[in-house]
Amino acid sequence: MAESDTSLKLPALADLFVATALDAGAAILPYWRNDAPARSKSDGSPVTAADLAANQVILERLSRALPDIPIVSEEADAPAAAQGADNFILVDPLDGTKEFLKGAEEFTVNIALIRDGAPVCGVVFAPALGRIWAGWPDRARSGAIRVGATDPAEIAWTVIGCRAEADKPVAVVSRSHLDRETQDWIARTGCDASPSGSSIKFCLLAEGAADLYPRFGRTMEWDTAAGDAILRAAGGRTETVEGAPFVYGKSGDGYANPGFIARGKPKNG
């Protein structure tokens, strides 16, 4: 698939991302609940052999299929590879490493295409749950698959969409990074808080199970892009805390995100 094809064939690109995510998930599962060795990176975040195994699967497959599109991965050695590119791919091979190390199920494989600063195609796969989500403009789906399976034909897909905001909104919050600013925001807005892990929070908004996802602490673009693409495809949006557009490709900032609020449909939407 050449770069010129990606702007025209997002469904085919999503299929590629789905198949790649399934294989990456299969590379992760042997390490899950099996005392995977971990070390701390320079920013203090953990990395395990599972992260690296999934990263290798993803980079090899996508580089072969899309040789002209730069790939920025959390575990890559050259994160500036996409500087100035109109199209590039963001990868988090194992989002939610802290949950993974605790033996929890809420970790994901995240793959997204960024075009002109916006996430236009994304896949989030939760290998331990057998749940997968995919989205591109005006098309969002969630799927169920047998844990450990790698054949995309086994996925049972359902079309999803954001719900109109409830009278008492439900806000998904980070299970591992719930800071005081988020707690104060929840209290101030009167939302019900629902803890969740990894990019699944975006997907809960996309499938109409929650209304808001506030995040004031540090995240990186590879943490959010795939889930954000699915949320936007399902009719939602992500904005900075100040209400500005939430953009991608911030290579000058090391691909760090500002604080944001992700939303489903407005109450009268």
Image (cartoon, helix red, strand yellow):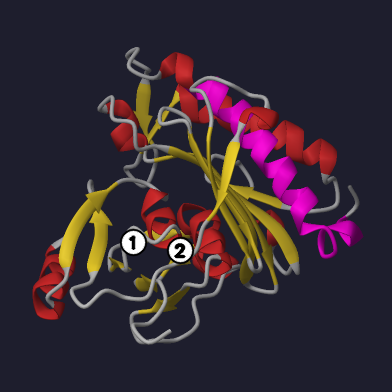
Q: List the residue tagged with mark 2.
A: 256
Vertical placement of 113 versus 132: above or below?
Answer: below
Q: Residue at x 36, y 24 (%)?
A: 38
Q: Residue at x 47, y 24 (%)?
A: 50
Q: Position of residue 256 (x, y in %)?
A: 45, 63
Query: On the image, which quarter does residue 262 sit in?
Result: bottom left
Q: Quadrant of the C terminus?
A: bottom left
Total tally of numbered discs in the picture: 2
- Magenta segment: 3-28
Is residue 125 visible in the rendered image? The answer is no
> Badge 1, how many Cα within 10 Å: few under 14, some, many 20+?
few
Is residue 261 visible in the rendered image? The answer is yes
SS class of the residue under badge 2?
strand
Q: List the residue tagged with mark 1.
A: 218
Q: Is residue 180 left or right of residue 12?
A: left
Query: 135 or 83, which is in the foreground?
Result: 135
Could you tell me how far apart the alpha carbons at marks 2 and 1 are, in whole angstroms? 7 Å
Query: 225 or 193, which is in the foreground?
Result: 193
